[in-house]
Amino acid sequence: MSGKLIIFSAPSGSGKSTIINELLTKDLNLAFSVSATSRAPRGKEKHGVEYYFLSPEKFQEHISKDEFLEYEEVYQGCYYGTLKAPIEELLQEGKNVVFDVDVVGGVNIKKYYGNRALSIFIQPPSIEELRKRLTARSTDAPEVIEKRIAKAEYELGFANQFDTIVVNDDLEKAVQETHTLVKEFISK
């Protein structure tokens, strides 16, 4: 039996990665979608594990052959995207594929797969709370946090294009709500 797709999008700091990581520990037959990028590996990153590392030329070749579900040129010559072939292989194996993508990518993947995909938008309780979370991480300078807040405000405008919105005002509750949504969706 072919698998299904679960798409997650959210502003940075909404708790999306934490929720996804919790779901991956559950017995839901989930496989995480590995994205492709044209940037070089960082640290101990490995091809096919964190990303599929492609040269910009190879990335553009895949684009010209329509082999991406979605992609974006983040800045000149630096691409990120989701290749169709690895996703189709996972689906054929009966795996349910989880995506962690930006809002535009999430909307595009949902359009491509229609009812085979469940799109979930993880929303922070407020912009103020999001600012607190990003500040508490102590990983970004104040000007970077403000750029992330501005981007979050833009991304929040896409929430209504997702099948469902989970407000993460209580992480445990958000994980449980998401688990229930995913479990119900894959059992249909």
Image (cartoon, rainbow, N blue to C red):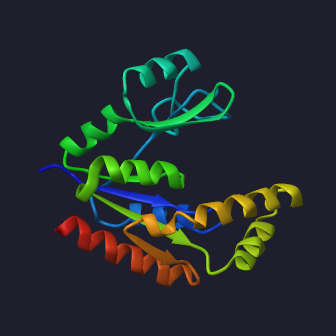
Q: Is residue 48 visible?
A: yes
Percent x, y for residue 27?
29, 65
Q: Say which quadrant the C terminus sits in.
A: bottom left
Q: Is residue 12 visible?
A: no
Q: Residue sitting at 48 percent across and 79 percent down?
A: 174
Give x and y (percent) for residue 60.
50, 20
Q: Report whether 125 appears left or right of 48.
A: right
Residue situated in front as seen by the camera: 24 or 173 = 173
The residue at the point 54 percent across, 61 percent down is 17
Q: Quadrant of residue 33?
A: top left
The x and y percentages for residue 47 are 50, 29
Relative to the observer, which residue lies in front, 14 or 160? 160
| Outermost residue, right side | 142
* Position of residue 123 in the picture relative to residue 133 (left or right): left
Q: Does residue 131 sit above or below 5 in this rendering? A: below
Please name the residue shown 81% across and 68% down the image: 135
Q: Position of residue 82 (x, y in %)?
A: 44, 38
Q: Nearer the viewer, residue 91 or 58?
A: 58
149 displayed left or right of 178? right
Q: Quadrant of residue 146?
A: bottom right
Up-down relation of residue 175 to residue 76 (above or below): below
Q: Indicate left or right for 93 with 83 as reference.
A: left
- Which of these two is toward me, 67 or 50? 67
Number of disc labels: 0
